Amino acid sequence: MKRILVLGIAAIVLVTLAGCAPGPNDLARSPDEEGEIAGFWLGLWHGLIAPITFVVSLFSDGVSVYEVHNNGGWYNFGFLIGMSIIFGGSGGGAARARRSRAKD
């Protein structure tokens, strides 16, 4: 009985999380007003400046965190790498934990 309850709760959580997934970007692979499509390098740059862009976007309707006129996966990959660089990636926390254990 307990196993069925756990599986039921897990299924509900999974369906709820799947319902929150974003839909497709209809503007992907379409040029912007200047005729350009953002690629990997622009995605990397946007990932690096994302914290600043987020704060500015709170006060300005003309600024967005994410470029919707992008080439798809490569822009997303660059954006993710840029965000990882800014927020330390997974290795930064592990290094800090090791240093704090060494001090103790």
Image (tube, grey):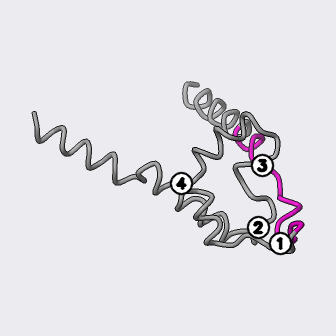
Disc 4 from disc 1: Cα separation: 22 Å
Q: Which residue is mark 2?
A: 70
For marks 3 and 1 on the same chain, the one whose residue lies earlier in the sequence: 3
Which residues fall within the magenta stretch? 17-33
Which amino acid does the dot numbered 1 rest on?
Arg
The stretch drawn in magenta includes residue 7: no
Q: Say whether marks 3 and 2 touch (CB < 8 Å).
A: no
Q: Which residue is mark 1?
A: 29
Q: Quadrant of the C terminus?
A: top left
Q: Residue at x 52, y 62 (%)?
A: 81
Disc 3 from disc 1: Cα separation: 17 Å
Along the line of sight, which residue is nearer the eye, 102 or 64? Answer: 64
Disc 2 from disc 1: Cα separation: 6 Å
Q: Which residue is mark 3?
A: 22
SS at circle 1 = loop
Along the line of sight, which residue is nearer the eye, 51 or 23? Answer: 51
Q: Which residue is mark 4?
A: 83
Quick check: 16 left or right of 103?
A: right
Quick check: 103 left or right of 78?
A: left
Along the line of sight, which residue is nearer the eye, 22 or 6? Answer: 22
Q: Residue at x 64, y 64 (%)?
A: 43
Name the mark nearer the viewer: 3 or 1. 1
